[in-house]
Image (tube, helix red, strand yellow):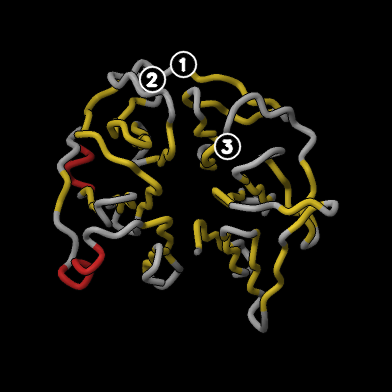
Amino acid sequence: TVRSIYQDKKGFMYFGTNSGISIYYGNGFKNIDEVNGKKIGIINQIAGNELDSIYVIASTIPFFYKLNSQQLENHRSSVPVYIYSMLYDEHRFLVCADDGLRVFENNEFKKINLITKDSVKFISKIISCNNNLWLIGRLGGSMELVNKKTLQTTAISPRLTVTQLYKDAQDNIWIATKDKGILYLDAADIAQNKLQLSAVPAALQFLSNSEINDITGDKEGNIYFATVGKG
């Protein structure tokens, strides 16, 4: 089961699975399933920045790793909470955790105090919609559009179990869920502070009730969906 997909600047592909990481270098795969003799287990996400610093979030202690020269190492940062995912935005990593949103700077996880309308603290995913707005998703809570400057909610959706958010080249947002397949937000609606879920293309209707773990795209505009049981 593929749970996360990441492509670095060299074009290498990284796949987070239920038992570690598979890295595709163009001519074959390298699998990493343990660090210092201990099994890694389920990978929640793989994330990187413009310098190709690549971090790996696992679902068990120690949770947080850095990938160096094709080898995983425990990161020296103290992880105060359960981390679900990260987003690199405006030269910093935003961290989705069980106590809300944090920022990873100077090897510390600092709390960001959002003013939201949902009582569910656990944020599973965040994505930058434009210069002014983030979209946050939760496990069993509402999605919310949040103003980056005021940190206040501008729109809220019905409750969903969001596993991934992906922005395509036209700034539309694709939403992966645990039990409702793939959902879609039009860029024009987002620009007007609307969370109006639209129908996905007919070719994707067969995934309407599927569990989707990840969504990613390539430079050619193709979009890939990682599912449970359907490839």
As drawn, 216 above or below 183: below
Determine whether label 3 and label 1 are within 8 Å by CB. Answer: no
Tags 2 and 1 touching, CB below 8 Å? yes
Numbered label attached to residue 151: 2
Dot placed on the residue nearer the N-terminal end, 3 or 1: 3
Q: Residue at x 50, y 57 (%)?
A: 3
- Badge number at residue 223: none
**Earlier along the polypeptide chain: callout 2 or callout 1?**
1
Instruction: Using residue 84 as the reference point, say whether residue 128 is left or right of it.
Output: left
Per the image, the residue denoted by label 3 is: 93
Percent position (x, y) of residue 121? 41, 23
Residue placed at 60% from the left, 21% from the top? 110
**Taking 223 as reference, is 100 above or below it?**
above
Mark 3 and mark 1: Cα distance apart in space: 16 Å
Q: Secondary structure at mark 1?
A: loop
Q: Of 148 and 41, which appears nearest the observer?
A: 41
Relative image position of residue 23 (x, y in whole percent): 65, 68
Horizontal side of 170 relative to 72 (left or right) equals left
Q: Position of residue 163 (x, y in %)?
A: 40, 47
Quadrant assignment, res 109: top right
Tell me which label, 2 or 3, sits earlier in the chain. 3
What amino acid is at disc 3? Answer: Phe
Q: Secondary structure at mark 2?
A: loop
Residue displayed at 42% across by 64% down: 226
- Residue, x 55% and y 19% (percent of image)? 111
State the residue in front, 77 or 188. 77
Query: Which kind of residue does numbered mark 2 sit on?
Result: Leu
- Label 2 packing within 10 angstroms: few (<14), some (14-19), many (20+): some
Which residue corresponds to mark 1?
Answer: 113
Alpha-carbon span between mark 2 and mark 3? 16 Å
Tell me the CA gap for discs 2 and 1. Answer: 7 Å
